Image (cartoon, rainbow, N blue to C red):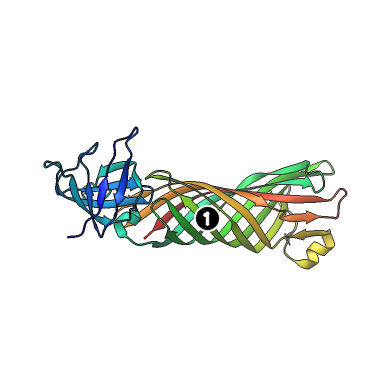
Amino acid sequence: MKIFIILLMAIPAFSQKIIKVRGDNILISGDDISLEEGKKYFIETESGEALIGTYTNASTGSGFVAKILEGDVAEGDRISSYRKKKVGGSSGSSIARSGKPFQFGIFLGANQMSGKTVEQDSGEEISSTDAGTGFQGGAIAEYNFSPKVALNTKLGYHVTTTSGELTIGGATFTRNTDLSFVALQPTIKFRFSEMFNVFAGVRAGMAMGFTQNTEDSNGNPVGQEVDLLDEATQTAGNFEVASFGLDIPLGLGVKFNLGNLTVEPNFTYYLPIGASIENNGVTPAQEVLLSNMALNIDVLF
C-alpha cells in the first residue's frame, strides 16, 4: 500500500512540516501530537483543511498511519492545528463535509439607505436625509476555492427609501424617495475562522423605479409623485439620475452548519462610487450620494 510520509516536527506554537505526499495515505510521526486509533481528525495546513482517518497508533515508535479522506495537503506544508471530528461531522466546514466546490442558495434581508447632497467641486455637504428602511432578496451561487476562500455571487431585487425635511417659504415639508433596483454582487469571502468570515467586492445595480413625493407637516401629499427616471422630468429640472450604479460591499458574516444546510447571517455596508443624482440647475452644481447598509440571512444548500 502506497503511503504519504508526514513528519511532524515540534517547533514553538505547534507547527509540523509535511515531508512527502504519496497517494491517499499518510504516515505521521508521534512527536508533539496524539491521535486515537480508528478516529477521524481535521488538520489545518497551508493548503487548507483536510480530514484524515487514523489506522494505527504510535506505540511501536513508527508513527501514526492514516488516510486523507477529504481535502488536500502538499509537500512543505506545516500543520498549524488538529482536532477530532465530532460524531455527525459538525466540527468541519461545509466544503470539507460535502467535498463540493459549488453551493447554491437564497438570501433575504432588510436594508437602510441614507443620502447626502454635496457640492460637486468642493465636496462640501449641503444637506442629508434620514435613513429609510427597505428589503431585498434573491439567489446565491458560491464557489469554494478552499475552506478559507470563496467567490460569492448574489443576484437580487432591492427596494429601499430615504426621507428628508425641506423648508419652503417658512413651511416645513417631508420629501420621500423610493428606489427599486436589481443588482449583481460578486464578492470574495475570506473565512478567518471556522465560524466567521469577511468579504468585499463590487455591486452593479440597474434602477427599476425611482420616485419622489412630498408631504406637508400633517402628512398630506403636496403635488404629484415625480418619476426621477423620466427624461422629461430630468430635463425640466436640470438634473440627471444615474439609472446604473456601482458601490463597494464590505461585510462580516457568521456561519452555522445545520447538516447539509449552511445558514449565514451577515452585515454589509455599501460604499457609494459616484453620484446617484447630478443637479446642474443650481449654482454651484450639486450631487446626491446614496449609501446602504443591509442585514441578510443567506441559506446555502
Identify the image quadrant of residue 204.
Answer: bottom right
Describe residue 231's horizontal placement relative to residue 156 as left or right: right
Residue 238 appearing in the image: yes
Describe residue 294's horizontal placement relative to residue 244 as left or right: left
Packing grade of label 1 (10 A; few <14, some 14-19, many >=20) is many
Nearer to me, 228 or 26:
26
Quadrant of the frame with the N terminus:
bottom left
Q: Residue most toward the right? A: 283
Describe residue 55's horizontal placement relative to residue 124 as left or right: left
Mark 1 lies on a secondary structure that is: strand
Identify the image quadrant of residue 2.
Answer: bottom left
Tell me the residue at 64%/49% (across/down): 291
Nearer to me, 297 or 96:
96
Q: Amino acid at mark 1?
A: Thr
Identify the image quadrant of residue 244.
Answer: bottom right
Tell me the residue at 73%/52% (across/down): 214
Query: Residue 156, how many percent across, how many down?
Result: 53, 61
What residue is pinned by disc 1?
187
